[in-house]
Image: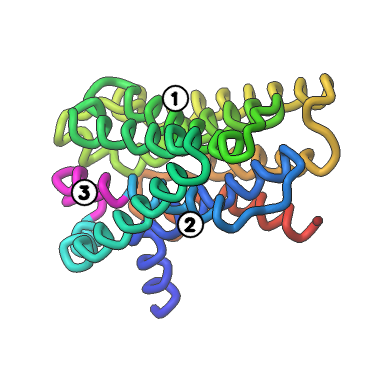
Amino acid sequence: MKNNFIINILVHSNVFIALLAFSISYIGNILIGKEPDIILMLIAFSVMFFIYTINRFSDLKEDIINAPNRVYFIYKYGKYLLTLSSIAFLSSIIYALLFHPVMAVFISLPVLIGIVYSFFGLKRIFLMKNVFVGLAWGILALINGAYYGVFSPQLIAFSIIVGVMMIINSTVFDLKDIEGDSFHNIITLPVKLGIGKTKMVCSMLNLSLVMFTAGLFYLNIFTGIIAVIFLMYGYIFLYIYFARPVNNSLFYGIFVDGELTFIALIFLILR
């Protein structure tokens, strides 16, 4: 019971999804040959913490069906989360403007994408949600380049991987929301194609990432320890297979959203 409570807090507060951003920043530093920078990782954390907190408010109507526990959590604690995430994001923007002005652009773009997606009805356009999610996360991976002034082929390739990975991630999340999305006439891939075909599409996208990454190793763009990333693709195949249209905080909030956090931990151990 206590474990479930902790999991729900991590998921509903958006702390765990923000840890994914923290992990992306950590891996990005490794790719460009830099030591992990805690300030940079906290900035990435704050960006996604803010975006997903805003999104929780915009999705309340759908979440009454899709995730009633999350709705209750937001009604009870949402104003505190919004205040905290806003302070964290504004602090990141101020820091960027003072010390790394170019980075302010890469911090602002994901937030702008998140606001447009959340409040301008674009999620009702078929596949637009998934594309916007992938775009926002892909840009986030480039914050490291703006921070150091180094946009290496490794970092750009990683940005593409993160973007496609999060398209898969958001599509798998749509599986649990079929009932609420159908009721509110939001046409997602699972609503349109069904569970089986959606899983097939996600698996094909993941396979394309395997082939893309193999090509990067063939061209010596990725080398050495970065091969650990292939474990992530196996991890993604697993959660695609086990995904069900059931709202399960442990599976979706921790397991599905934990792909790169899991990889970052392996990097940390190996290094």
Residue 180: in magenta span: no
Residue depth check, mark 1 versus mark 2: number of the one nearer the observer:
2
What secondary structure is the stretch in magenta mostly built from?
A: helix
Which SS class for mark 1?
A: helix
Q: Secondary structure at mark 2?
A: helix
Q: How many dots with numbers?
A: 3
| Badge number at residue 254 | 2
Instruction: State the residue at coordinates (84%, 25%).
Output: 220
User: Badge 2, how many Cα within 10 Å: few under 14, some, many 20+?
Assistant: some
Mark 3 Cα-neighbour bin, 10 Å: few <14, some 14–19, many ≥20: some
Q: Position of residue 22 (x, y in %)?
A: 54, 52
Task: Compare residues 11 and 246 and report the one nearer the observer.
Answer: 11
Q: Secondary structure at mark 3?
A: helix
Tell me which amino acid carries mark 2.
Ile
- Foreground disc of the pair 1, 3: 3
- Image quadrant holding the N terminus, namely bottom left
Q: Magenta segment range?
A: 53-67
Identify the residue under disc 3: 63
Whether residue 205 appears in this view of the structure is yes
Q: Nearer the viewer, residue 89 or 197?
A: 89
Which one is earlier in the sequence, the residue at label 1 or at label 2?
1
Give the image quarter of residue 182: top left
Horizontal relation, residue 201 to residue 152: left or right: left
| Residue located beneath label 1 in the image | 197
Q: Is residue 90 left or right of residue 206?
A: left
